[in-house]
Image (spheres, coloured by chain):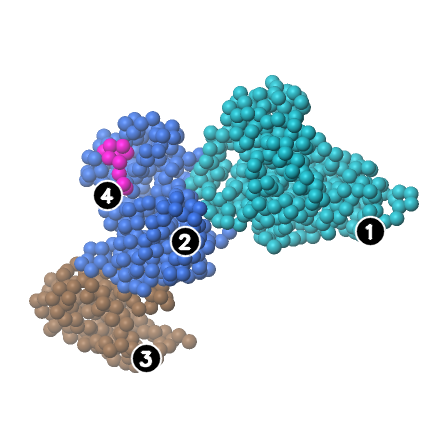
Chain colours: A cyan, B brown, C blue
Amino acid sequence: MKIHIKNGHLIDPKNGIDAKQDIYIAAGKIAAIGNAPEGFVANQTIDATNLVIIPGLVDLSARLREPGFEHKATLESEMLAAAAGGVTSLACPPDTDPVLDEPGLVEMLKHRAKQLNQAHVYPLGALTHQLAGKEITEMCELSEAGCVGFSQADVTIKDTQVLWRAMQYAATFGFTVWLRPEEPYLAKDGVAHDGEVAARLGLKGIPTAAETLAIASILRIAKETGAKVHLCRLSTSEGVEMVRSAKKAGQQVTCDVSANHLHLTDFDIGYFNANTHLKPPVRSQRDKTALSNGLADGTIDAICSDHTPVDDDAKLYPFAEAEAGATGLELLLPLTLKWAEENKLKLSDAVKHITQAPANILGVEAGDLSVNASADICVFDPNQYWKVEAKALLSQGKNTPFLGLELAGKVKYTLVNGHVVHG
Amino acid sequence: MNLPNAEILFETLAERIKPLIKANTAIVGIHSGGAWLAERLLPLLGHDLEHGILDVSFYRDDFNERGLHRETKPSQIPFDVQDKHILLIDDVFYTGRTIRAAMNELFDYGRPASITLAVLVNRGGRELPIAPQISTFDTALADTQNLQLLRHENGTFYFTLEENT
Amino acid sequence: MLNPQLNDDSELKHLLSIEGLPKRILNQILDTAESFAGVAEREVKKVPLLRGKTVCNLFFENSTRTRTTFEIAAKRLSADVITLNVSTSSQSKGETILDTIDNLTAMHTDMFVVRHAQSGAAHMIAKHVAPHISVINAGDGSHAHPTQGLLDVFTIRKHKPEMHNLRVAIVGDVLHSRVARSEIHALTTLGVPEVRVIAPKTLLPQDVEKLGVHVYHDMNEGLKDVDVVMMLRLQNERMAGAMLPSAQEYFKIYGLTSEKLALAKPDAIVMHPGPMNRGVEIDSAVADGTQSVILPQVTYGIAVRMAVMSILAGN
């Protein structure tokens, strides 16, 4: 299928393009930028006047809820949500049911996803069996089955010796270890940032030290074992500073932040709004500012959605008992745009955090519009506002702290492998 | 209408109440106007008379419509109501509902031997089969008119009449 | 964000926490409670205000004391009272909180009095009830216990009317105490100039000074010249959670004895929300002594709750 997208404003951070350019697609790949290739006759023309064209978004964390949690969401619904959000590649954490610690499960997931013919799904394998933090998984087999890295999702390994050896084993083969830094004993039963708001609301706090202690351990072990580590969902200013120092000292580490944490502080809990119950918790204004600065100066590499759909009832509990997490695939783009606007950043600088940078972390060919790259493209209207409400979201999860807000950035077309999956 | 002189009416009230004071009598003023009257009557009645104040906020029949009155004051009935002859004092008698509430409240304190209602003004318009035994001034006012007893800083009484449209 | 406790006329619609209540409403409740305190002294302790109304005590967390005082308060207002003791285990995966509420609403409940082990439960319920129903928070997790805070300041007002000149000390496990939080908010809203908390670091919330209190770890320093000493209950779980070594050491350092009380003003009053752990947070000599107003607190609690229910029912 030959597609010609015309009159749009093309932004491709990797190739430094930020200009009005046409784009030509053939055989599922990008055939040319700017001028049509010889003899190109389009089967479909998309008029992208006043629209922006960027590489399809690469989301480092999206829970698809399969296998095992089909009451919360299904592969079908969440892949449609991804398409609606302009996401063409996504990594999913291994905390499914059963846990993604067997090659067979990974193959099945990849197969199911491929059949749907929507976004590319890159599973993260479990680092330890059942995520229990005792025995390491068959990382080589899992890698062969399609895992792009190994993660513990939200479960921290308590036994430092096990963590060390898991990272050592991963380092042997150059696998990246994805860890959300949280000291399990300090964070136990905690539901909010340990500070004034938690004190007022009588919610058990998770201190900043829970994150910084864990970062210190992880970075040290990574240094000694030579493991490549990706820190997931930073939330503290001190944590950002620690990564900054580590990178400066030459350590190979990457990290991401959730789009939610760029916009919310613990004050947004308000009157116990269960939609703001997230992991890690939303923290103080200073932390939020540091996360933003961290992105701007390259300390933080990528923004992800941390898409975590829950079923409707799961939030209808008092704050601490409500299931943590927010739906996010359809909000990654508008929240990134909002962040860029508020911090007066160029669109191309913002876009790289959701395209090129996450693709590098995943180690996959994605996140750019180079000629011969897979035609994974997102076309959106940066000026069209839409209201975040249940009926506007395709995801089965309607749980977002941004409910009721009007956000700018509506995806008009999403293409994967050169065919239109949305629009 | 010419507003009556509250001070003159008050003197009349005192004169008509005096003979009713017996051994087992107590005087109870209904907050706020009745309470003011009772307060000034007390020294005039010359005895060590048992006295109290009733705030009928908790017995009104318009709670569901109007909610709890903004300022409730505690009722103070420091004597035993049982078998007492109660002189119930109020400023303006209108629909009779305040008195109905006052009597219900009094009966929650005990069973009086009798209740005599004495008011300064009976403005007509009663909605219940209740009437003052003593009234120093009778008149007929419209529903739109609001007659109020007020008190100067020096303690002397005067009436105001408002026209509500 | 609109204040979920107030209706469109800025009058009290739910009582969920003292934080966020305008001072005039606090005063309205306290002043109304004065009138109800008088009712308690009569033979017939009832008034007909809530006749025909149904008050439902919905206790997801057990409490005989608080539940009983709410029952008494509602009955003294001539209301019909339903009491539901919903143990959390039976309700956890079966009927949700909101399903329970919906069922009770269908049974013509006009007012819910709710106690729950989780902070924010009362807010959640208030958000979901039908518009004509009021919710009173009888204690949600560590967050708030507004009627306790109110009856505590009512007690203080009765014995120390000069609120603008007081030093008040709150002693004990502030971290886990909804009573302490409500007391702090009530005192600061009413303009008490100095509110102190006295506790070991393990029993104080992070950033507690931001609530407007002075922090003391030394009880001898903290009690100096105070007018009111408010003791908090110590729960056994604190020893299990490595926050305290033993009840004995706690009593030695933070327990209120006659010697320690002597550091406060000679006419200082001693309060405790109950139930007391004698010999743990407070000495019997003090609890039963002349400066203790612990028993009157209970009576005032009924008057304050009657005031809250009346105001809510009328708005």
Mark in the foreground, 1 or 2: 2
Q: Earlier in the sequence, mark 4 or mark 2?
A: 2
- The subunit letter for the residue under badge 1 reads A
| Alpha carbon separation for disc pair 3 and 4 | 52 Å
Q: State the residue lying farthest toward the front.
A: A104
Give the amino acid type for the residue marked by disc 4 in the picture: Val
Where does label 3 land, which residue?
B141
Q: Is residue C280 magenta?
A: yes
Question: Which of B70/A397 is in front?
Answer: A397
The relative height of residue C40 versus residue A168 in the rendered view (above or below) is: below
The relative height of residue C285 versus residue B158 in the rendered view (above or below) is: above
Q: Are marks 2 and 3 in contact (CB under 8 Å)?
A: no
| Alpha carbon separation for disc pair 1 and 2 | 56 Å
- Residue C293 numbered mark, or none: 4
Q: Are marks 1 and 2 in contact (CB under 8 Å)?
A: no
Mark in the foreground, 3 or 1: 1
Indicate the quadrant where residue A175 lies. top right
- Residue C100 numbered mark, or none: 2
Q: Is residue C85 visible?
A: yes
Question: Which of B53/C307 is in front?
Answer: C307
User: Which region shows up in magenta?
Assistant: C274-283
Q: How crowded is the residue under tag 2: few (<14 C-alpha within 10 Å), some, or many (20+)?
A: some
- Numbered marks: total: 4
In the image, what residue occupies the spot 64% across and 30% down?
A142
Q: Is residue C187 visible?
A: no
Where does label 1 land, which residue?
A45
| Alpha carbon separation for disc pair 4 and 1 | 83 Å
Give the amino acid type for the residue marked by disc 3 in the picture: Leu
Indicate the quadrant containing the C terminus of chain C: top left, top right, bottom left or bottom right.
Answer: bottom left
